[in-house]
Amino acid sequence: MDKEIEKEVALEVSKQLLEAYLSVENATKIIQENCSRDEFEGFHSEAGRVVGGLYLLLEPLWRAYPDLAPEGLVMVPPKKKSKR
């Protein structure tokens, strides 16, 4: 994603998706504290997929506007594949 999304829109989307991430993290803690190990492991696995999906949505926004990324997250350009 190039800077085709206006920064104000990117900021709001980033904020909403980070709130979703925190909600998933909090739900995972609740399951861990109140459910069996098997239930937790199943939930944790699916929560990981959700969080991974959220990252796939957030990463292009943060790459376009690095100042929107959480503090301490450094956006490193992907390595180019070498030709053999």
Image (cartoon, grey):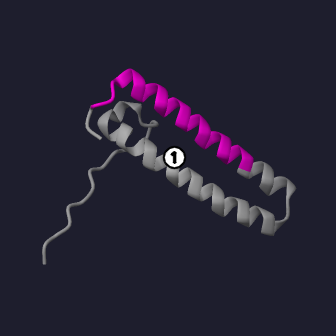
Q: Is residue 13 left or right of residue 38?
A: left
- Across the whole image, how many numbered discs are drawn on residues? 1
Residue shown at the point (44%, 42%) measured from the top left: 58
Residue positioned most to the top: 8
Look at the image and say whether residue 11 sits in the magenta stretch.
yes
The amino acid marked with disc number 1 is Leu
**Boundaries of the magenta span:** 4-27
Q: Is residue 12 magenta?
A: yes
Task: Give residue 40's position: percent from left, percent from top.
Answer: 76, 62
Rendered residue at 32%/41% (across/down): 63
Q: Position of residue 77 (x, y in %)?
A: 26, 50
Is residue 43 visible in the rendered structure shown here?
Answer: yes
Q: Taking 48 as reference, is 36 left or right? A: right
**SS for tag 1?**
helix
Side of 38 where 44 appears, left or right: left
Residue found at the very far bottom of the displayed protein: 84
Write the residue at 39% across / 21% down. 8
Which quarter shows the C terminus?
bottom left
Kindly identify which residue carries mark 1.
Answer: 54
* Residue 67 rendering spot, x and y as whole percentages: 36, 31
Q: Residue at x 34, y 45 (%)?
A: 75
Instruction: Please say whether residue 73 is visible from this viewpoint.
Output: no
Measured from the top left, where is residue 73 in percent x and y?
42, 43
Give the main secondary structure, helix, strand or loop, of the magenta stretch.
helix
Q: Residues within 10 Å of mark 1 (few under 14, many from 20)?
A: some
Image side of residue 1 versus residue 72, left or right: left
Where 16 sits versus 48, above or below? Answer: above
Q: Residue furthest front?
A: 4
Q: Residue 41 occupies which quadrant of the picture? A: bottom right
